[in-house]
Amino acid sequence: MSNTSTIIPALAWACVIILVAFVMQSQGVSDPATAGIIFGLTGAAWGSLQSDTPCGRGCLQ
């Protein structure tokens, strides 16, 4: 993820994850449920950002 073209998408994912965490806590969602959703979003972000690398999703196998 050293490529500068991934900085904006990485920041966008970070903002979305933080925003979702704040919204879930403000709505009174339980901590385990919030953690599960945050972990899911983190996995989606990781996969999304890694798919732009030269080896693509093949490196994750």
Image (cartoon, helix red, strand yellow):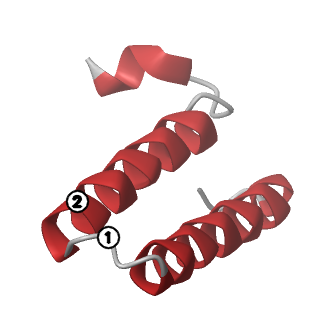
Identify the disc placed on residue 11: none
Query: Residue at point 22% right, 59% down?
Result: 33
| Residue at numbered disc 1 | 29
Q: Quadrant of the N terminus?
A: bottom right
Residue 50 screen position, x and y as percent: 54, 38
| Residue at numbered disc 2 | 33
The residue positioned farthest toward the front in the image shown: 28
- For residue 16, what is the image quadrant? bottom right
Amino acid beneath label 1 = Val
Residues marked 1 and 2 touching at CB (< 8 Å)? yes
Decide which of 2, 16 is in the foreground and name it: 16
Residue 13 screen position, x and y as percent: 65, 60
Residue 31 screen position, x and y as percent: 19, 75
Decide which of 24, 7 is in the foreground and name it: 24
Q: Secondary structure at mark 1?
A: loop
Horizontal side, residue 42 vs residue 3: left or right: left
